[in-house]
Image (tube, rainbow, N blue to C red):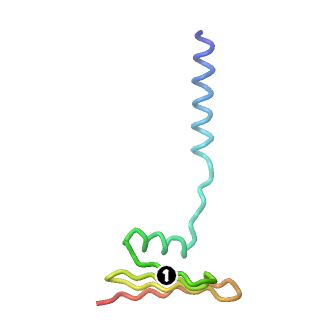
Amino acid sequence: MKKLTMIALFTGLITVSLSSCRDKKDMTEVEETVQEMQDKGADIDISEDGDKIKMETEDEKVKIKTDEDGDTKIKQKETD
């Protein structure tokens, strides 16, 4: 019984140590901006092709545009 308990304990420790060392995916600037605006409760409008994203709160407007080359432009404007 003691051997079974020790095996379970070591298995648990190895599982925890391996899962904590896993690389976490870094969010891109666009993903961070969208997440931030969602947290603020923004109205989000995405174009049909997904190239333009417009987000608006009472205090802020953000536009994200992706061109044909895959370059993104982020425009932020605070409203008074």
Q: In what quadrant of the picture does the C terminus appear? A: bottom left
Q: Residue 20, image x and y in percent?
A: 57, 44
Q: Residue 38, image x and y in percent?
A: 43, 71
Kindly identify which residue carries mark 1.
Answer: 45
**What kind of element bears circle 1?**
strand
Kindly identify the amino acid type of the residue bearing the numbered disc 1: Asp
Q: Relative to 27, is 12 above or below?
A: above
With 77 as the anchor, is 54 left or right in this view?
Answer: right
Q: Which image quadrant is residue 57 in? A: bottom left
Q: Which image quadrant is residue 48 in? A: bottom right
Q: Relative to 26, is 20 above or below?
A: above
Q: Residue at (70%, 88%) from the top-left corner? A: 68
Q: Residue 45, image x and y in percent?
A: 49, 81
With 12 as the anchor, is 55 left or right in this view?
Answer: left
Q: In what quadrant of the picture does the N terminus appear? A: top right
Q: Which image quadrant is residue 69 in? A: bottom right
Q: Relative to 2, is 20 above or below?
A: below
Q: Residue at (58%, 30%) from the top-left corner? A: 12
**Residue farthest toward the front in the current orientation of the protein:** 48
